[in-house]
Image (cartoon, rainbow, N blue to C red):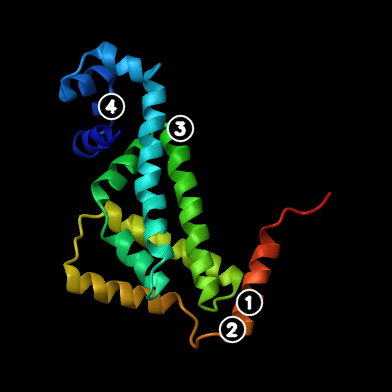
Amino acid sequence: MNAGLKALAKFGFAALMADTLANRLRVSRGSFYWHFAHVSAFHAAILSRWREIALENILDRIKGAADDRLEAALTRAFSTDLETERAVRAWATFDEQANSAAEAVDVERIRHLQDILVDTGVLPKTAEMRARIMNWAYLGFALSSARLDDGALKSFVTDLSQLVRPNSPPSSDETRGLRAALRTRRRPAKP
């Protein structure tokens, strides 16, 4: 999977063909098909691995962040491998399987950012829009050729996190109330 992601990032979607990847890995085409019944199964596995890197690994690392979880999430996201993000997004423009995977990752990113914002005291509906804005900022950054050194990244993360936070920190009672409102909003309506 990692070799497939590297090939995707460096050479684009065409590098994810069985022959191309088998040659690059110096394995037989038969060996490739021993692991995957067909190329679309390989593509699904590549997209699953990308999800781990683009979402799950970041979430795992910020769950136990001793400091500010919002800044930890933004720092981690904006300092990851953006070539793979760009390659998956390019692939998603013409492939339904890749598009569905990218949309699912976006939904999860937004949901997790919204949860973090609610914990800082942002109202749930406002938190949802601010989470979308942060995700759009990330995608715009990922698709651009911009790069930030450590100092610029720290300044950018601080500024972006301040833009999306409430003006004053909430009390613990307010935070509990906001979280309860968010959980209630996510429950499906009873028939």
The residue labelled by disc 3 is: 96
Dot 3 amino acid type? Glu
The residue labelled by disc 1 is: 176
Q: How many marks?
A: 4
Task: Determine which quarter of the picture holds residue 153.
Answer: bottom left
Identify the element where label 1 is drawn: helix
C-alpha separation, residue under disc 2 versus residue under disc 4 = 50 Å
Q: Are marks 2 and 3 in contact (CB under 8 Å)?
A: no
* 31 sits to left or right of 94: left
- Tag 4 or tag 2, which sits nearer the N-term? 4
Give the percent coordinates (x, y) of residue 51.
Answer: 40, 44
The residue labelled by disc 2 is: 172
* 111 sits to left or right of 20: right
Crowding near the residue tagged with mark 1, few <14, some 14–19, many ≥20 C-alpha atoms within 10 Å: some
Dot 1 amino acid type? Arg
Depth check, mark 4 against mark 3: the one in front is: 4
The residue labelled by disc 4 is: 16
Identify the element where label 2 is drawn: helix
Q: Which mark is residue 112?
A: none
- Tag 3 or tag 4, which sits nearer the N-term? 4
C-alpha separation, residue under disc 2 versus residue under disc 3 = 44 Å
Residue drawn at (36%, 39%) of the image: 49
| Residue 48 visible to the viewer | yes
C-alpha separation, residue under disc 1 versus residue under disc 3 = 40 Å
Dot 4 amino acid type? Leu
* 2 sits to left or right of 125: left
